[in-house]
Structures are given as structure tokens and as C-alpha cells.
Image (tube, coloured by chain):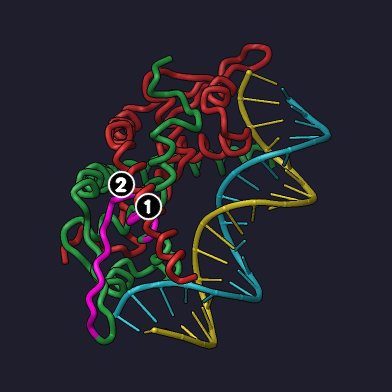
Chain colours: A red, B green, C cyan, D yellow
Amino acid sequence: MTRAFEYNADCPTLLVLDRIANKWAVLAIAALYREPRRFNQLRREIGSISQKMLSQTLKGLERDGIISRQAFATVPVTVEYSMTDLGRTLAETVDQLRIWSEKNIDTVLDAQTNYDSAQSQYAEIRR
Amino acid sequence: MTRAFEYNADCPTLLVLDRIANKWAVLAIAALYREPRRFNQLRREIGSISQKMLSQTLKGLERDGIISRQAFATVPVTVEYSMTDLGRTLAETVDQLRIWSEKNIDTVLDAQTNYDSAQSQYAEIRR
DNA sequence: CAGTATCCTTTATGATACTG
DNA sequence: CAGTATCATAAAGGATACTG
């Protein structure tokens, strides 16, 4: 077996996965990919995210050096989030997922329909 | 704002994200990327996954047409999981995350250390 | 072997209220 | 505006027992 697929606790993939195998993080990264945003701006744009989750997600991404946070001493305070150089390289990778999704969504949807009808047919027989 | 970043319920990215922004799914995809595996083989390989989660994850991936399940009428039964053609294209994309992780894990770890020490320093001042 | 079913615990997330 | 704190609930996950 190759080193790449050892899923032990020290595996870097697992560490990074705990950050990005997360819907909110992916959405935040995608939103910040092109241009910086303020907190509530992000919140409105992502839409489905709560204040708590956004705050938590941004903090985690900042901790990992994926995004950076800059506060301006306005009244009230303005805070701008933006991708770091490191973050941008991750964002490009994550963006591939978006591209894959848009390209293959129809195939996936068809597969789901197929699977579901096969299942209900089986349920029919069992009854 | 570009179409790509509208996070409404119909967004294909969100639908796919609900599947792959998931640690177990990513691990299963990574494990099946190179060669087919049997259920318990996968379980041992991923290690940290429970029977319940593996079963659930594989079912979801099969439903989406990412992997396929083939049962052999041996005693006891043997079941082999493998990537579909569609799945393989996703796996390649997901594999980029693994590559990114291995390449940048040190930078991320450093960023975390930095962030944490800055935080504790602040806590020190507040006290 | 390859699961399913069930119960129980932990974690994630939402809603609400409050602050500099 | 940009959060934090707290409580409540829903969802995820683990452990165990059981089956073809």
C-alpha cells in the first residue's frame, strides 16, 4: 500500500480534511476566492449560514493561514476577510470541485433517480 | 456577482458538496481510487471508520453513481466496491486535495502555532 | 463476510440576546 | 458592523447485538 493511503492520525490529509471536508469552509473559501468581503457581506452572500457558523468557520480558516482578517478602526468597526497566498492555492483546488459539480450534476441526478427507482421496485417485490 | 457563487438550493455545487464535503466520503473515494475493495477490507484500511458510517457512506456514493457495488454469490457473500468512470473523474479532483495537503501541511501547522500563540498572548494581557 | 437495527452519546448547528 | 455567549435541538457518530 502506498504511503498516501495510510489514514493514521498523523496523516496531513486528515488534518486538512478536518478543515475542508466541511460545507461551510468550502463555501467561505469559494466566496472569498475572487475578492475580499466583510463579515455580514459574506453572510448575506452565502445565505444559508448562521452568524455563529460563519464566525467559527472564518476563525478556523484564519488559524490555518487560509484567509486573513483585517480590522479597520471605523465606527462601527469594519472587518475585511481575504484569501492569503496559501489560501488561494487551496481555493483553486477547491474550485475544481465546483467545476466538477457543474459539469456532472446531471449525471449524478440521473444516477440518483435510477438508484431510487431500483430500490422502490425491490421494496415492491418484498411486500 | 458571478453565477458560480450563488448559493441557492438548486446550486449543483451544493448538492455535490453535501456528498463530498464529508470526511468519510473523501476517505472512501481515496481508498477506492486505485483499486476495488471489499467491505471489511475498506473498513480495516480506513481504520477509524465504523461499520455504520462505512455502510452509509458507500450507499450514498453508490446512489450518486460515484462507485459501484458488485455482490458475488460465495458463502459467505463477497461484495466488491469499485469506482465508476464518473467516480474516477471525481477521485482525481479529490486527489488534488490530498496533494495540496501533503505539500502545505507544514505551512498550515506553522500558521496554527502562530495563531495560537498570538491568542494566548492576548489572553495574557487581558488577565 | 457484509451488512441492518437499535439505543445512546457526542457534536454540530440554529435561535436569541447581548456588547464594543 | 462584527462579533460573543448561552441555551436548545437536530444531526452525526459509536457500540452492540443480530442476520442471511
| A66 relative position to A89: left or right | right
Q: Percent x, y for residue D10?
A: 65, 51
Give me the residue at 45% from left, 28% from top.
A68
Counting from the top left corner in percent of width and height, residue B115 is at 47, 39
Badge 1: chain ID: A
Q: Which residue is at 39% across, 68% downward?
A: B48
Q: Do discs 1 and 2 share a chain?
A: no
- Residue B82, by quadrant, is bottom left
Label 1, secondary structure: give it: helix
Q: Is residue B90 visible?
A: yes
Q: Specify the amino acid type for callout 1.
A: Leu
Q: Which residues are magenta?
A: B59-74
Residue for badge 2? B105
For residue A15, which numbered disc appears in the image?
1
Residue closest to the eye, B110 or B4: B4
Quarter of the image holding residue A87?
top left
The residue located at (64%, 37%) in the rendering is B125
Above-or-below relation of A25 to B30: above
Image: B120 above or below B6: below
Q: Quadrant of the N terminus of chain B?
A: top left
Viewport quadrant of the C terminus of chain B: top right
Which numbered mark, 1 or 2, is in the foreground of this view? 1
Question: Decide: marks 1, 2 in contact (CB < 8 A)?
Answer: yes
How far is the residue under mark 1 from the one under mark 2? 8 Å
**Up/down of A17 relative to A103, above or below:** below
The amino acid type found where label 2 is placed reads Ile
- Chain of the residue under label 2: B
Q: Residue furthest top?
A: A74
- Nearest the eye: B60 or A87: B60
Label 2 neighbourhood size at 10 Å, few (<14), some (14-19), many (20+)?
Answer: some
Could you classify mark 1 by the number of other residues whose Cα lies within 10 Å: few (under 14), some (14-19), or many (20 or more)?
some
Look at the picture and state if B46 lies above or below A76: below
